[in-house]
Image (cartoon, helix red, strand yellow):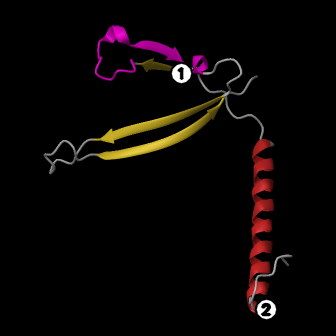
Amino acid sequence: MSRFVFADESADYQQRRAELLAAELALKDQVERVAALRRALPLGMRVPDYVFREGPMDLSRNDPADFRDVRLADLFTDGHDTLIIDHLMFAAASPATTTPSIATLAWRTMTVRKILA
């Protein structure tokens, strides 16, 4: 039961608030157990050292000389072991659509952690 009692709250309200508090504490404990299980997982498969094409910050520059190869391992620098990737993918408009501005956009964010072997 909560140690705080609000003015004019009924016994039923106090009981339901206590049930809610107990459920919230149980949920927090469950989240912590799941996080501990996730941290205890053994290392997964070794990820290949993919090579990406990095372009200029100015998207209007499209000269091949402005692009360079970047290895996956190069995206992790000293002291930084987490990489967040925002993946944007445009799907072509349907054949019935003639307006090029109508497209399907899929946005996926991934977090990649470097595992130091």
Judge left or right: residue 63 versus residue 115.
left
Which label's residue is closer to the chain start, 2 or 1?
Answer: 2
Judge left or right: residue 93 versus residue 19.
left
Up/down of 106 relative to 116, above or below: below
Up/down of 28 relative to 86, above or below: below
Q: Which residues are magenta?
A: 56-75
Residue beneath disc 1: 50
Q: Residue at x 76, y 49 (%)?
A: 35
**Percent from the top left, x then y, of residue 77?**
64, 18
Residue beneath disc 2: 11
Q: Residue at x 43, y 12 (%)?
A: 68
Residue 61 magenta-highlighted = yes
- Mark 2 is on which residue type? Ala
**Percent from the top left, x then y, of residue 86?**
48, 36
Is label 2 or label 1 in front? 2
* Cα–Cα gap, marks 2 and 1: 62 Å
Residue 99 magenta-highlighted = no
**Secondary structure found at label 1:** loop
**Percent from the top left, x then y, of residue 64?**
32, 11
Judge left or right: residue 17 versus residue 51.
right
Taking depth in this image into account, of 35 and 44 the one nearest to the observer is: 35
Look at the image and tell me in which quarter the N terminus lies.
bottom right
Q: Residue 115's quadrant in the figure? A: top right
Q: How many marks?
A: 2
